[in-house]
Image (cartoon, helix red, strand yellow):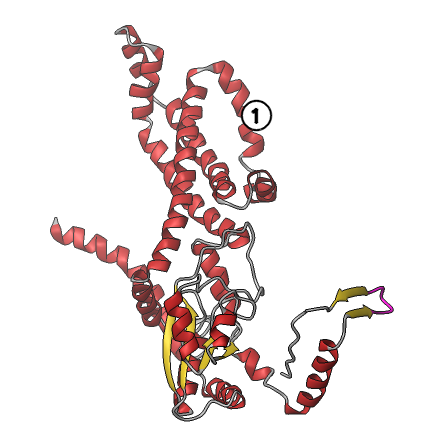
Amino acid sequence: MIARRLGEVSLGILPVALVIALWHGIAISGIAPAVLLPPPGAVFARLFHQIGDPNFLSQVGITLFRLFAGFSIAFVAGVTLGVAATGSKAFESVIKPLVRVLAPLPKVALYPAMVLILGFDDASKIALVVADAMFPILLATYQGTSAVEPKLVWSARAAGTSQRTVLFKIVLMAAMPSVLTGCRIGLIISCIVVFLAEMITSTDGLGYLLVRAGRMMFADRIEGKWIDAFCEVFERCAVKRGDTAAILSETQSRALNVQLAELALLRLGARPFHIVVPSPRNRHPVPVRSTGASEAIGGLSPVIGALGAAGFVVDCTIEGLMHAPETPAILKNGARILVISNEHPEALERMAPDPALETRVRAAAKLLRGSKRMTVTSPGGTNLDVDMAGAPTVGIWG
């Protein structure tokens, strides 16, 4: 008996092992680049690392809440409607046409309408899970309860059991295998659609992390050419051997840029240290990007003091400190701030600072500082009028 059971378990594990072996073979063969298809060992190691990350676990909790909140509502609604359709011919005649029309309809097509009605928060995502998961449960419950042996119902009714009790204590219990099959299908669909909803509109959850990682090409490999590019920029900022440099980052900052900044500073002989602050929650209904006004420091005096005491600050926050409220206090203490965009370092590789443009850009910046109004027109109909009075002016030649 034990040997037979072990054989069944081995046969169940074998397909999974073959898929992992094929995956590993393709990864090490070089057919696909490691940044697109890392080996299984690297993926599992990263997974174990992420499990210990509180930020990752909070994102898992957000996704699971949406998943099981929607699935629970779908379960209650599906089972109730399925049992009611079995117990009432009138209700069955009403619900059947609706199910025939709505069940085959791709619910994702309704998601934009759900967002407009329910907003970008949890409600629209839970509603999509409910809409997709309810019909498999409803149909499975109806089919299971309709197939219950009539003799069981007759016997219970003959013993004086009420129709409601018969439905829920006899018919539903007898149909439970079919109901659980519908729940299994509904749960799988729920997992798919909650990820899909988070990938489309969310600013949190595992679906959002997946899209964010894909768009930003998160990778663990560090290229020497990127360290060279960072060194060139730091040298232009007059970073010298022995200088103290603070690397400011958030828990959701691009780790690759943080590591590159540290390695480049060490190569130049500087003395870097890290300040890592939690990424603040985005309380806006849509993603907020490119504001230059990071809220990560949150007015913390110890962080402001440490940054001000450092001669050079490498700003790796997601939004940057250019317009952050703490920036004047940091600069007042004599520190210099270099903002590192939260983009992939290949952008710096392509758009390194160009010395040939420096003179022209400085002249243009000086012209803007002396202007009170700027007007931009074009043959295409552009007519931009900007009030320049008191506006901060900077120049970038790269």
**Is residue 201 toward the left or the right of residue 178 in the image?**
right
Q: 88 and 371: which one is in front? A: 371
Residue 199 vertical placement versus 275 (above, below)? above
Q: 187 and 196: which one is in front? A: 196
Place of residue 292 in the rendered image (x, y in percent of width and height, measured from the top left): 56, 67
At horizontal 23% and vertical 58% (from top left) the residue drawn is 10
Q: Is residue 337 visible?
A: yes
- The quadrant the C terminus occupies is bottom right
Magenta region = 377-382
Number of marks in the image? 1
At horizontal 59% and vertical 85% (from top left) the residue drawn is 352
Please identify the residue farthest to the front as the structure is shown: 332
Please identify the residue farthest to the left as the structure is shown: 2
Residue at the spot of label 1 = 97
Does the magenta portion include 381? yes
**Is residue 155 toward the left or the right of residue 139 in the image?**
left
Find numbered disc 1 in the image and state the secondary structure of the residue it sits on.
helix
Q: 370 and 87: which one is in front? A: 370
Place of residue 124 in the rendered image (x, y in percent of width and height, measured from the top left): 52, 41
At horizontal 32% and vertical 30% (from top left) the residue drawn is 176
